[in-house]
Amino acid sequence: MKNTYAASLFSAIVEAPFGAVGIRTEASCLQELVYLPPSFKAKAATDALAAKVAAQVMRYLEDPDTIFDLPLPEIGTVFQRKVWQAIAAIPRGQVLTYGQIAKHIRSAPRAVGQACGANWFPLVIPCHRVTAAGGLGGFSHHDDATGFHVGVKRWLLAHESAAATR
């Protein structure tokens, strides 16, 4: 019952090797991408934009060189948008640390981490490519090394690294 209600919040759900990706569209823009556990099943798109997003997400899950071309709303603070722009510039198969991003934009690593966690568009703005100086770091405001979200980060990085060695 809980997942049925939660699934109704999404315009589409795409199954993924790590679980699923929830897609929320509204007002002709992608509003949010959400990593969902395996208990969520695929949901057909409820509108044309959700279908476009779903197709691009599925393409990325097969080919991490996929370039997303989606309408995103202007959300977030000026600082968050600065961090997200720096993250979007990280090439597939590479990672930067929170500290490296912070140095680049003249900020602090913790603030960069908070902006990463506030990213509404993971995959499109690939925050999984940002790690801690001493290891993987957290993901989507979760830092449990054995948790679902950190597992998603591990999968995404392995997916992109595997493509880099082909």
Image: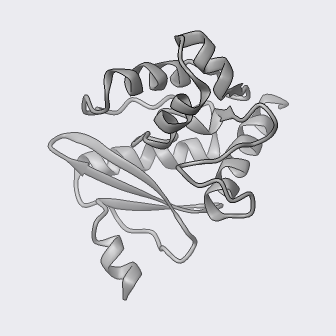
On the picture, is 32 further left or further right than 95? left
Farthest residue in the bottom direction? 1
Picture coordinates of residue 102, whole percent (x, y): 59, 19
Picture coordinates of residue 39, whole percent (x, y): 53, 77
Task: Say which of 137 and 123 sits in front.
Answer: 137
Task: Say which of 138 and 3 sits in front.
Answer: 138
Q: Is residue 56 above or below residue 2?
A: above
Residue at (83% x, 31% y) in the render: 166
Residue at (77% x, 31% y) in the render: 133
Picture coordinates of residue 10, whole percent (x, y): 31, 62
Task: Say which of 85 and 43 sits in front.
Answer: 85
Picture coordinates of residue 164, whole percent (x, y): 78, 29
Q: Quadrant of residue 112?
A: top right
Residue at (73% x, 25% y) in the render: 94
Q: Is residue 35 above or below residue 40?
A: above
Q: Quadrant of residue 98?
A: top right
Q: Which image quarter is the N terminus in?
A: bottom left
Q: Quadrant of residue 18?
A: bottom right
Farthest residue in the right direction? 165
- Tell me how many marks there are: 0
Residue at (56% x, 35% y) in the render: 113
On the picture, is 132 further left or further right than 77? right
On the picture, is 149 further left or further right than 122? right
Name the colouring of the figure: one colour
Q: Is residue 66 above or below residue 144?
A: above
